[in-house]
């Protein structure tokens, strides 16, 4: 799997589309044009979450690394295991 586009990303409303997520080079990562059943508020919330993805992944990786360094075991279903599963999913390493 190739690496994702580096952050930071940001969400914006503009004349071209209802909501877009763009990178620091002003490239469109994803956008929603035209009309659909989603409200502008829901589109904006989704775009903000997508735009935060690189920051969330980096923060989660650092937190997980700190936890691993502390040798704290993670029981199935624990936040530690949820963090590992989320990192794997984001990086394409999940089964």
Image (cartoon, grey):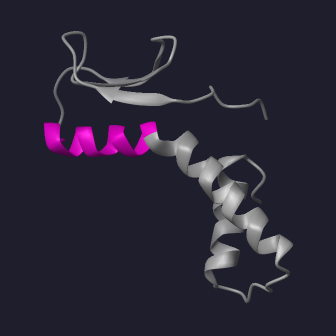
Say which quadrant the N terminus sits in: top right
User: Residue at the spot x=71%, y=87% of the render?
Assistant: 76
Instruction: Tell me which corner region of the image, top left, top right, bottom left or bottom right, holds residue 38.
Output: top left
Q: Position of residue 26 (x, y in %)?
A: 45, 11
Magenta region includes residue 38: yes
Say which quadrant the C terminus sits in: bottom right
- Locate residue 33 relative to residue 62 in the image: left or right: left
User: Residue at the spot x=15%, y=37% of the render?
Assistant: 40
Q: Position of residue 4 (x, y in %)?
A: 66, 31
Q: Relative to 94, is 69 above or below?
A: below
Q: Relative to 18, is 38 above or below?
A: below
Magenta region includes residue 94: no
Q: In front: 72, or 78? A: 72
Mark count: 0
Stretch in magenta = 37-51
Residue that protrudes farthest toward the bottom in the picture: 75
Instruction: Tell me which corner region of the image, top left, top right, bottom left or bottom right, holds residue 60.
Output: bottom right
Classified by dominant secondary structure, the portion drawn in magenta counts as: helix
Q: Position of residue 6 (x, y in %)?
A: 63, 27
Instruction: Tell me which corner region of the image, top left, top right, bottom left or bottom right, holds residue 78.
Output: bottom right
- Locate residue 46 relative to residue 94 in the image: left or right: left
User: Residue at the spot x=57%, y=40% of the render?
Assistant: 54
User: Residue at the spot x=62%, y=26% of the render?
Assistant: 5
Q: Position of residue 14 (x, y in %)?
A: 22, 16
Q: Relative to 10, is 70 above or below?
A: below
């Amino acid at each position: 799997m190739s690496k994702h586009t580096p952050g930071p990303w940001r969400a914006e409303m503009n004349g071209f589309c209802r909501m877009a997520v763009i990178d620091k080079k002003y490239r469109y990562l994803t956008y929603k044009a035209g009309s659909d059943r989603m409200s502008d508020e829901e589109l904006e919330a989704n775009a903000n979450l997508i735009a935060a993805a690189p920051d969330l992944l980096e923060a989660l990786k650092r937190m997980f690394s700190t936890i691993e360094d502390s040798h704290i075991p993670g029981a199935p279903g624990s936040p530690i295991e949820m963090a590992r599963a989320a990192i794997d999913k984001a990086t394409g390493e999940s089964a």
